[in-house]
Image (cartoon, rainbow, N blue to C red):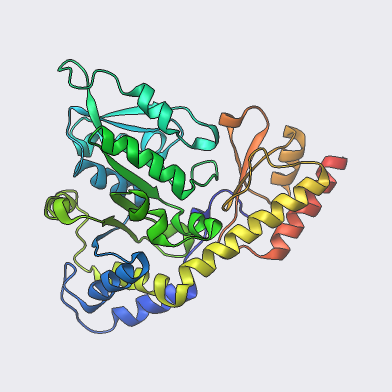
């Protein structure tokens, strides 16, 4: 069983079926199609708000372009030092913003606190210093923690006080949403989020993400930036059809609930073995400390997972997905017991 990431798994059958159906016959290109129109309608229902929706193929593109439309080259983006925009996007945000500086901040569980951002803002109004541009948070975080709506609102208050925008990297947006039990509106624009990278690839789609704006002021600029970045898909219907199927009948929420439930099953089983998770399990990521000998035995038995040096020696990450089976979790737990006893 592969617990390295939710990226290692394929697409949900309903998403694949939607692709097959959208593939039949011709349709207008570049987003002028019924699926793209339906996608905007569906998302506006989900978020209870007028939206500007721009599908793209990757989360890196969504993050980089969303920030580029709002942040000037002489400004700063405040983010956690473990965030994808800081660690995993090969300088994409800096490239697409034309040189905006990422200010990486500490915080338990890869969450940043309002007071940490406030302390990091120096030289405001001083021509020799980068100026505040945006706060970017990840929901759920790279360590599986979830921002409460009140925490998001507190960060938004800091952003507004310094004339910044609040961006949310929602790579695991659905997992965070079902964990909180709130609405998409409560977790985003009602809490002060200005721009959202809406993730779907990790939760059952092939390569379909979307930039969502809750204010249309930057929509035209972002459309040009998307085209210039090579992210305006000619056969947009094939991305939009995935996202429509993802949202239809709340498939996205069902997928996330299952992934989260499998993570909890893993956490409870490991705790009974005497290996409690290193961090609270709030979404579908779990971190545990395993002796290298035990970890090697598990990997030799066919289980795959990543080490996580950020949490110290012998720390490992396990990620569950929409299609993780209970028997796979239970099999892993049995193998852990055996490896631990050896």
Taking the spot 63% from the left edge, 44% from the top edge, the residue there is 280
Q: Quadrant of residue 327?
A: bottom right
The quarter in which the N terminus is drawn is bottom right
> Residue 32: percent from the left, percent from the top?
16, 72
> Residue 253: percent from the left, percent from the top?
49, 67
Q: Is residue 307 left or right of residue 219?
A: right
> Residue 161: percent from the left, percent from the top?
27, 34
User: Is residue 263 placed above or below 296 in the rendered structure?
Assistant: below
Taking the spot 33% from the left edge, 48% from the top edge, the residue there is 192
Identify the residue at the far right of this view.
341
The quarter in which the C terminus is drawn is top right
Identify the residue at the far top of this view.
128
Taking the spot 40% from the left edge, 71% from the top edge, the residue there is 247
Q: Is residue 57 left or right of residue 299?
A: left
> Residue 82: percent from the left, percent from the top?
46, 34
Viewer can see residue 189: yes
Viewer can see residue 89: no
Q: Is residue 257 left or right of residue 62?
A: right
User: Is residue 177 placed above or below 15 in the rendered structure?
Assistant: above
User: Is residue 195 placed above or below 116 in the rendered structure?
Assistant: below
User: Is residue 129 placed above or below 186 in the rendered structure?
Assistant: above
Q: Number of numbered discs present?
A: 0
């Amino acid at each position: 069983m592969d617990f390295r990431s939710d990226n290692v798994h394929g697409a949900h059958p309903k998403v694949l079926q939607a692709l097959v159906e959208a593939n039949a016959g011709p349709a207008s290109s570049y987003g002028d199609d019924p699926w793209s129109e339906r996608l905007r309608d569906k998302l506006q229902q989900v978020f209870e708000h007028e939206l500007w929706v721009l599908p793209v193929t990757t989360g890196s593109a969504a993050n980089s372009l969303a920030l580029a439309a709002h942040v000037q080259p002489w400004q700063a983006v405040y983010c956690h030092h473990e965030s994808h925009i800081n660690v995993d996007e090969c300088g994409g945000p800096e490239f697409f913003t034309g040189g905006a500086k990422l200010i990486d901040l500490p915080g338990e569980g890869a969450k940043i606190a309002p007071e940490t951002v406030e302390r990091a803002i120096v030289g405001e109004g001083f021509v020799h210093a980068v100026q505040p541009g945006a706060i970017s948070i990840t929901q759920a975080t790279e360590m599986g923690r979830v921002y409460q709506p009140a925490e998001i609102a507190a960060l938004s208050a800091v952003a507004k006080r310094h004339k910044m925008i609040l961006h949310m990297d929602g790579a695991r947006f659905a997992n965070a949403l079902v964990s909180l039990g709130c609405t998409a509106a409560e977790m985003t624009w009602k809490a002060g989020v200005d721009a959202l990278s809406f993730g779907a690839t990790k939760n059952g789609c092939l390569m379909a993400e979307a930039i969502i704006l809750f204010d249309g002021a930057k929509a035209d600029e972002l459309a040009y930036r998307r085209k210039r970045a090579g992210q305006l898909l000619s056969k947009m219907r094939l991305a939009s059809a995935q996202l429509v199927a993802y949202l239809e009948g709340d498939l996205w929420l069902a997928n996330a609930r299952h992934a989260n439930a499998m993570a909890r099953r893993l956490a409870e089983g490991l705790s009974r073995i005497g290996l409690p998770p290193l961090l609270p399990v709030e979404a579908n990521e779990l971190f545990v400390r395993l002796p290298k000998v035990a970890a090697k035995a598990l990997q030799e038995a066919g289980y795959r997972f990543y080490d996580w040096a950020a949490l110290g020696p012998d720390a490992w990450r396990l990620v569950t997905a929409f299609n993780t089976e209970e028997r796979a979790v239970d099999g892993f737990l049995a193998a852990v017991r055996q490896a631990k006893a050896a």
